Amino acid sequence: MDISYAIRTLRPASTIAYGGILSSVILGGTVSFFSYQYIDFMGNASIVYGLFIIIVLANTAPPAVIRLTAELKIATSELGRLAVCSSLVNDMSCLFLYALIIATHSWEGFGRGILCLMITVGLIFLNKYLALWFNGRNRNQKYLKNTEVFVILSLVITTSMIIELMSYNSSINCFLLGLMFPREGKSARTLLFKLTYSINNFVLPIYFGYIGFQFNGHYFQKLENIITVILFVVLSIGGKVGGTLAACKYMGIPLNEGVLIGFLLNMKGHADLVLLSGVSKILSWTLKSHDLLLIIIVINTVISGVVISIIMRKEEKRLAQAHRSLELQDPENELRLLACVYGPRHVAATVGIISALRGPQTAPITPYLMHLVELPEKHKDKSALYHELEDDKIEVNEDDYGGNDVLEINDAVDAFTADTKVLIQQVKAVSTFSSMYEDICDYAEDLRVSIILVPFHKHHRIDGKMESGKEGIRTTNQRVLRHAPCSVGIIVNRGPGGAPGFTQILSSETTQQVATLFFGGPDDQEALACSKRIATHPCVNLTVIRFVPSPSPSLSSSTENAAHPDDDVFLADFYNRHVRSGQVRYVEKCVNNGTQTVAALTEIGDMYTLFIVGRGRRGQSPMTTGMSDWEECPELGIVGDILASSEFSINGSVLIIQQHRNPGI
């Protein structure tokens, strides 16, 4: 669960969840009043029966919602994430109501409820201790040992069994255990690695099959049963979707999105099956009653799934990636980015850029780190099979896919998370260089990121020279620039004595000097948009250096010579927002040709630890005339290529940014 997102959207998610619950309470109470005589019960328990019907109609199954949003590729969209958070709020609320019914049924039940709560709190603290201890014990290992994983899972399963034996449902307790489990370190990484494959490919399919297996088709042999089922299903769908739509309208969510969220929240599943078996401890009913409610649960889910698929066919394009660049994105909104590394050498500068883009404490950021591993051409026939291997085989052969680089990368990521409390989610892509760009672009589109960060193919030596690495890295970067679904940044890691020029900002004692070079054009505007967020970081001093082709005493007169008219508007807005407030320093450099531009760059080469510049297309600009004669790497642009050249001495890293362009442009 994305805790930071859940906290930010707790109000809208709760409003949507309780909107559906409220309408289900009204309809459920009405239906239970009229259907109580129809259901075969022994004894007088109309109130408990009414509450039970309300829970069944109101409940949402988060596993079904999570799986469906993932299959529809909207799990990372704002709508999908909001639906998942709302389903969790809904499910936990319904299960909590069920727990209250059990607890208030008798004094003995209330005492057992307090004991369950104490056991859960105790295990939360024990898990925190065990996770830290296991992380320390396996400092030089990629994952925990199987015995250590068994210890953690045994504690969870044992606690769950104890809670179930006390007539309570353990879902809330297990959810809290997972929610409070430490996210950084090898313990969490190992559990995700071990459980993801088995849950998605074994447990959930069996779970959904088990629901369908209990479906009794013979129940439809009588007309009165069919009418009853139709009535319950219509009221269930109408109540949940209607209440959700009302809540969405209150929150200002468009109608079509509200309908989609409503049907997503109408998915039934695990909790309903638990209630069917658990409520029998309070109510005495016949098999006919059980079959009726089970059929309602199954049909509800089937209808919702079909309707969602139909809606998605119409709304697929509209729900596609929203923020493909940084220029139109508010620095205070969430930034989603995908950073790529090939080995430990690239991690320091990449993590440094992520820490700077984090901005102020209030600005949310969701970074993903992709470890790119080359699959040699002679193993090309096995590349497709790697993703199909079972987990135990992947673990055995993993030294062939990344080797010990994984340890250093994981340690750097864990250190970053411990210092900043920002969780970097890690993924690995194993493929040949010829198809690696496809993995990067596909992940970027699925994750809906606004920018992709890739490392330069050259690395900095101790003597200050730039040494070429694998040519496949350069080819991958060029293809990513052409096919990326969002903006792209290339990180050139340079610094004094071969050390990284720009590293992670650890504390207020470390202040980084950053310069944004502005020549004009869409790419430089994107670079300036990126700088907006970096400028809000309390430990960064940002200077915007604008190069103008003729002497100009002020910003207003200098913009008359801009090659791109939008630069005037963009720079004026930036100036009013950030320069006038004193947050950013603004400087103009007057140059008339490429020679003067290089001289100006040389003057500032030792002043900054990071240079940000747009890739740009400056072939016709007089300020860069003649600079293309020295061009070695066209993918960096004219200015970026100069800054990354071995012949040009600077003490800072370079971030070259290309704004997202529509295909064919």
Image (cartoon, helix red, strand yellow):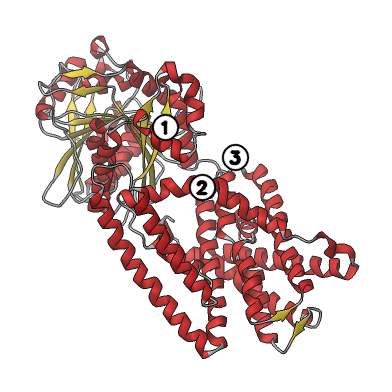
**Nearest to viewer (mark 3 / mark 1):** 1
Q: Earlier in the sequence, mark 1 or mark 2?
A: 2
Q: Using a 10 Å C-alpha cutoff, classify the residue at mark 1 as few (fewer than 14 neighbours), some (14 to 19) or many (20 or more).
A: many
Q: Using a 10 Å C-alpha cutoff, classify the residue at mark 2 as few (fewer than 14 neighbours), some (14 to 19) or many (20 or more).
A: few
507 on left or right of 458 = left
Residue under numbered circle 1 = 429
Residue 153: x and y in percent read: 42, 58
The amino acid beneath tag 2 is: Ser
85 on left or right of 574 = right
User: Can you say which quadrant of the picture contains the N terminus?
Assistant: bottom left
- Residue 198 shows which numbered tag? 2
Q: Earlier in the sequence, mark 2 or mark 3?
A: 2
Query: Relative to 556, is 230 above or below?
Result: below
Residue under numbered circle 3 = 317
Disc 1 from disc 2: Cα separation: 20 Å
Q: Nearer the viewer, residue 630 or 218?
A: 218
